[in-house]
Amino acid sequence: MTKISLIFEVHQPLRLKKFGIDYYKNNFEERYFATEFNKFVFDRVASKCYWPATQMLLDLVWKLKDEGKPFKVAFSITGTWLEQAERYQPGLIDLFKQFPKGYVEFLAETYYHSLASLYEDGTEFKEQVQQQVAAIKSLFGQRPKVMTNTEMIYNNIIAKRAQDMGFDAVFTEGVPHILGWRSPHYVYKPPYYVADKIKVLLRSRQLTDDVGYRFSARWWDQWPLTAEKYSAWLSAAGGDCINLFMDYETIGEHQWEETGIFWFFKALPYQILKYDNLEFALPSEVAKLEPKGEFDVFELSTISWADLEMDVSAWLGNKMQQICFKELKEMEQDVKKTGDKEIIKTWRLLQTSDHLHNICTKWWGDGDVHQYFSYFDTPHQGFITLMEILHDFKTKVHQKLMEKK
């Protein structure tokens, strides 16, 4: 029996002011962040994706709940999404609460969707994950057993840190150059000398991207993709598990309703459950499977789910990104010395990986993806904006420290 795990990444950043700082505002959010634009984006995506997609999945779970092989679904929700939902669309939180226990799972990740896992000191990474876990437990009554790091960034050190935080498994990308001849459709483990308890769950890149990226692509030789065709592919794929992990905005935002994406997902559970060798499972259930081998990712070969390279170059691939990352990382001690909750939160919001993603200068297909997600006219505008904010913020931090002396 192959276990199908369907997981959605639910995230919205707090975007920066496109044309620089509002120096007349003393409140950090109003000074640095595009408050009205963030509300506009969240409300738009909520109407196209969050409301209809969540209601659709909720209906499917309840309709198939008492079947021999029920439908199950999982979500990885960032703290920045939760805060915006509570502020702009609080009913969405209530809708997520309506999923019946045992048929939905909420994963852990960094609260601010940051690159803190790449800091040499793991303290900030741990604190952000713990903050997100506390939010999930408070809102949905679950203590996550499985985590996925920001953008599935992964190496052996991250696996060790996840194990030390008590997680049963950690998600990452089924990267071909790490797997070699092996399939992503099995559970793996880190090298025994790194972490001896935690499991590694791999995203099925091709099968996930068939929906997430290629679903509406008329140039694709498999277009149109139907639930019948897709479920047949899943049945023929083999293995112990197939982890389909995609952005939630795939449903209705990246793939518009007119493409038939809602009809596809409405039909998919019924088509999958027609196959005797397929059943839905939550990530924590997949994590109980026996590992078939080691998934060894040395820290200098860190992987992710982004772009063709599947490394961290989407956020750290050019000098501009590296300068911003270094500035953010080196602020940690001074920021935390202030003891000021607003300053600490602002620093963490500035760590959100989207800000660095907007500064990417890749070309061709990957460049198109980065341009799609960026609201800046050019990567260089994004760099200038972020650096101006970081310079101003550092000044505010130092002023606070001087006041404390």
Image (cartoon, grey):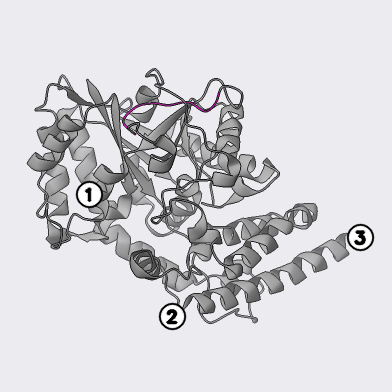
Q: Quadrant of the N terminus?
A: top left
Do tag 1 and tag 2 residues touch (Cβ < 8 Å)? no
**Residue identifier under label 1:** 210
Which mark is nearer the camera, 3 or 1? 1
Q: Residues within 10 Å of mark 2 (few under 14, many from 20)?
A: few
Which residues are the magenta region? 184-191
Q: Residues within 10 Å of mark 1 (few under 14, many from 20)?
A: some
Element type where label 1 sits in the image: helix
Q: Tell me: residue 360, above or below residue 66.
A: below
In the rendered image, is residue 81 in sight? yes
**Residue identifier under label 2:** 377
Q: Earlier in the sequence, mark 2 or mark 3?
A: 2
**Residue identifier under label 3:** 405
Mark 2 → mark 3, Cα distance in angstroms: 43 Å
Q: Earlier in the sequence, mark 3 or mark 1?
A: 1
Q: Residue 344, image x and y in percent?
A: 68, 55
Farthest right residue? 405
Q: Is residue 255 left or right of residue 17?
A: left
> What is the chief secondary structure element of the magenta stretch?
loop
Q: Residue 278, image x and y in percent?
A: 18, 26
Count of labels in the image: 3
Q: Residue 104, image x and y in percent?
A: 32, 32
Which mark is nearer the camera, 2 or 3? 2
